[in-house]
Amino acid sequence: MTKRDLVVRIANETGLTQLAVKEVIQKFLDSIVDNLAAGKNVEFRNFGVFQCRYRKSRIGRNPRKPQETVEIPARYVVRFKEGKVMKQKMTRRVASS
C-alpha cells in the first residue's frame, strides 16, 4: 500500500476530498519524523512504538571482496516494535497460512 492508496481509501470511506486527506496524512507523517529526529519515541496504543536508537560504529565487509574492511559510522536508527493488537493479527495470519 502506498500513501496514494491510503489517501484514496480514506477519502472514499469518509467522503472527504483526497486533497484534505493527503494534507492530514502528510502532517501526521511529518509529526512522527519531527519527534523521532528530536529523539522522542512515538507510541500508538495497540499499533506499535517507533523508537530512536543509537547504533555504534562498526567494521563491515564487502561481500564481493571480504578482505576489504569498511568502517560503518555511528548513527541513529528508527526501530519499530508492534503493539499487542497488531502482533495478535500477524500471529493469526501466520497460523492460517
Image (cartoon, grey):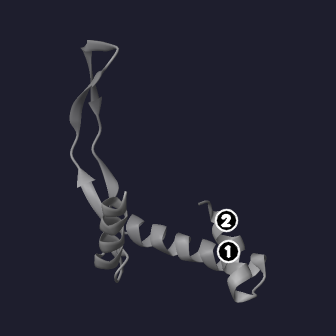
In which quadrant of the rendered view does residue 88 lie?
Answer: bottom left
Could you say which disc has been placed on residue 5 in the image?
A: 2
- Above or below, 94 against 89 in this view is above
- Above or below, 88 against 63 in this view is below
The count of marks equals: 2
Q: Residue, x 33% and y 54% (percent of image)? A: 77
Mark 1 is surrounded, within 10 Å at the Cα level, by few (under 14), some (14 to 19) or many (20 or more) other residues, namely: few
Q: For the residue labelled by badge 2, is the local secondary structure a helix, a strand or a loop? A: helix
Q: Position of residue 57 (x, y in %)?
A: 23, 40
Q: Position of residue 6 (x, y in %)?
A: 63, 70
**Can the viewer see residue 31?**
yes
Q: Kindly indicate whether the residue at mark 1 contacts the one at mark 2 (C-beta within 8 angstroms).
A: yes
Quarter the N terminus occupies? bottom right
Mark 2 is surrounded, within 10 Å at the Cα level, by few (under 14), some (14 to 19) or many (20 or more) other residues, namely: few
Name the amino acid type tagged 1: Arg
Q: For the residue labelled by badge 1, is the local secondary structure a helix, a strand or a loop? A: helix
Position of 11 with respect to 27 (left or right) is right
**Mark 2 to mark 1: distance in Å?**
6 Å
Q: Nearer the viewer, residue 41 or 19?
A: 19
- Above or below, 65 against 49 in this view is above
Q: Residue, x 67% and y 74% (percent of image)? A: 9
Q: Position of residue 54 (x, y in %)?
A: 25, 55
Q: Position of residue 96 (x, y in %)?
A: 35, 62
Q: Residue, x 38% and y 76% (percent of image)? A: 47
Q: Nearer the viewer, residue 88 or 14?
A: 88
